[in-house]
Structures are given as C-alpha cells and as structure tokens.
Image (spheres, grey):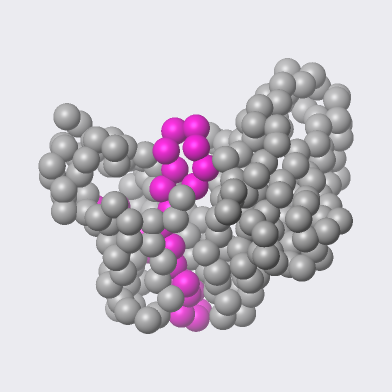
Amino acid sequence: DAGVIQSPRHEVTEMGQEVTLRCKPISGHNSLFWYRQTMMRGLELLIYFNNNVPIDDSGMPEDRFSAKMPNASFSTLKIQPSEPRDSAVYFCASTLNGWGLGNTDTQYFGPGTRLTVL
Amino acid sequence: AQSVTQLDSHVSVSEGTPVLLRCNYSSSYSPSLFWYVQHPNKGLQLLLKYTSAATLVKGINGFEAEFKKSETSFHLTKPSAHMSDAAEYFCVGGYQKVTFGTGTKLQVIP
C-alpha cells in the first residue's frame, strides 16, 4: 500500500490567496483526520471525518478554513483567504475505523504539506 | 474529560544509555494510548499501542511502554539509545477523542 498521500508537499503563497491541500487516505480506511503542526502550538486536530461525514470540526480555527471529503478516497482542506499565521505543516491521517466510544484505531499519517504564506 | 501530559519537552541522553520519556494521562475511562515518533521533516510513525490487552507493550526499534493505571502513566523506554532515535516523540490518548501530548524532543549525544 502506498500509505496516506498528500499533495502538494510544499506550498508557498501570498497572503490573501486561496490554498487547497489534498489527501488520499489508505484504501479501505473509513476515517480521515486533518492536523496542523506549528512550533508554537504543536499538533492540533482540525477536523475528523468518518465515512466521508465530518464528525468533529471543533478544531477548525475560523471560517477561512473548510474541509470536504466528497468520496472515500479523497479529501481537501481549503484556506481562503490565507494569512501568514496559517504557515504550518498540515498532516492528513487515516484509520481503518473511526475514533469513538471504545474504538481507537491506529492512525497512519501522510508526509505532510509544508505551507508558507508570505 | 481526557488529557495527555508529556512531562519533558526535551530529553538528552548519551548513545548507549537508557531512554525514558514520560507521559501521564487523565481519562474517566480506560483509554487507548499510543506513542508516535516524528523524525525531522517527516510524518508521524506509530511506535506502539496499548489497548488493555497487556500492560507492557513492545514496539518497533526496541522501544516499549508500560501502562500503570495506579500512576496514570504510560512512559516510553528503551534500554540503549541509538543516534537514529533522535526525534520528537508524541504520546497520544483517546477514548472518545484524539488527544496529543505536546511532544518530547529526544537528543542523543555521541
């Protein structure tokens, strides 16, 4: 298996531009997670999907951030408009089953997208 | 409510000496607990996982962790550090929600 695939690996953009990050989870996995990692705040869970449905988006910082999962093999995280404080590494992870009451599967992480907003 | 606390932000050991990375958890229920490792500019990789089957969990690369309910701890250990162990380590817990610790950076001195 190719593992979790993220694209692009690096993105440099200017403030105010729209940014779209992409993730392909491991085939057969039913849950997908988006994380943001910065030096200041560490690793933060942004949003979590189970069977393509957003379950917990309480970590999404503000309305400029949106995430979709149109099918089981693809998800996007969009920032519009982007700001310099959005600069971070964004990770996608997937699990075979979801996280929920008594069910805590291993998360498999992608390599991340390093976003720089100038 | 649940939380995971990594007690040290940085740990420095000499090559060949034991490694101890500390993690305490707080949960109303028996949580699942994980240790992940992140090498520079890489994604996170699972080291080991505890799910109540056995309190001593063996992971990859010689790491192991022991779940101690009385101490609410899940410390990560390795008998002998190798240069390649230098990385950041995350303790992760969850029952209903994923909770990441703040990470411990391990430095291995030759």
**Rendered residue at 29%/37% (across/down):** B84
**At which x and y percent is residue A16?**
86, 24
Residue in the foreground of this view, choosing between A44 and A104: A104
Residue in the foreground of this view, choosing between B4 and A45: A45
Residue B36 visible in the current orientation: yes
A9 drawn magenta:
no
Q: In this view, does B77 lie above or below A82?
A: below
A96 left or right of A7 in image:
left
**Rendered residue at 86%/30% (across/down):** A18
Residue A59 visible in the current orientation: no
**Rendered residue at 58%/77% (across/down):** A103
B43 drawn magenta:
yes
Quadrant of residue B51 within the rendered picture:
bottom left
**At which x and y percent is residue A94?**
63, 58
Q: In this view, does B36 lie above or below A52?
A: above
Q: Is residue B105 above or below residue B110?
A: below
B3 left or right of B35 in image:
right
Quadrant of residue B55 within the rendered picture:
bottom left
**Rendered residue at 13%/42% (across/down):** B16
**At which x and y percent is residue A36?**
63, 43
Q: Which stretch is magenta? A: B20-44
